[in-house]
Amino acid sequence: MYSMAMDLASSPTARDANAAIRATFGPLSVVMLENTELSPAWRVNFLANFFVGPLYRELQERYGLSRPQFVVLYCLAQQPGLVARDVSLVTGLPKNSISRAVSELLNAGRVRRGTDDADKRAKPLSLTAQGDALLAEVVPLFIARQTAMLEPLDPDEKLMFQRLLDKIIDHMPTWVDAE
């Protein structure tokens, strides 16, 4: 199979990077990242897994905060008044995981549930001072990791990376069912 990744892999810088990847993640990693029909998707998952995995382990160990709990808190910080279904829809996480996280956050006093005058069944959520303080402590961990991840890109490359992500995300409604 021929790919642009193979062309790029022949440069001295890429060979050094491949050696570092091989030494860190094993020889199969280079094959999976560059030489299979699923390499583009594998690369996205590889980045995502190694970006969030260590962060979520740290959140669990230091703060007793699970991934779904963090996701709920962060979503509510962006838009108070969401219900669990809204969080599930915007994150792609299963509704039962989000509902369980909401229950745990309610019990821990990190979120509160309100009432919606227009829809008595809806129970909008918002952060408590405790939830807000916790986010203020953990979001910098994500920012630091994001900064480290993007560090090798110059400003033009960062902009191009953002544009490419935008283009892929904008196309998602044609191949993803949100429910």
Image (spheres, rainbow, N blue to C red):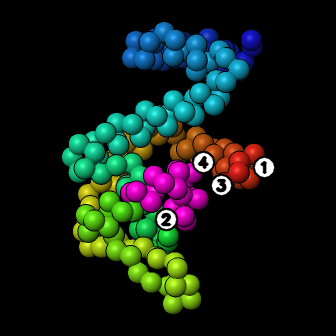
Camera-near label (1 vs 4) is: 1
Q: Earlier in the sequence, mark 4 or mark 2?
A: 2
Which residue is at the far left?
62
- Residue 22 appears at what percent x and percent y? 45, 12
Give the amino acid type for the residue marked by disc 4 in the picture: Gln
- Name the foreground residue: 21 vs 7: 21
Q: Quadrant of the N terminus?
A: top right
Examine the structure image and report whether residue 88 is included in the region drawn in magenta: yes
| Separation of marks 2 and 3 at Cα, in angstroms | 13 Å
**Residue underneath mark 2:** 84
Q: Looking at the image, is mark 3 or mark 1 nearer the viewer?
A: 3
Give percent across and percent down for residue 63.
Answer: 23, 51
Q: Which residues are magenta?
A: 85-101
Q: Earlier in the sequence, mark 2 or mark 1?
A: 2
Which labelled disc corresponds to residue 134? none
User: Which picture quadrant has residue 101?
Assistant: bottom left
Mark with earlier residue (4, 3): 4
Q: Position of residue 154 (x, y in %)?
A: 52, 40
Amino acid type assigned to the residue bearing label 3 in the image? Glu
**CA separation in Å, label 2 and label 1:** 25 Å
Q: Which residue is mark 4?
A: 162
Whichever of callouts 1 and 4 sits on the residue coming sooner in the sequence is 4
Mark 2 is on which residue type?
Ala
Residue 134 visible in the picture: yes
Mark 4 crowdedness (10 Å alpha carbons): few <14, some 14-19, many ≥20: few
Front residue of 94/66: it is: 94
Residue visible at 51% across and 29% down?
Answer: 46
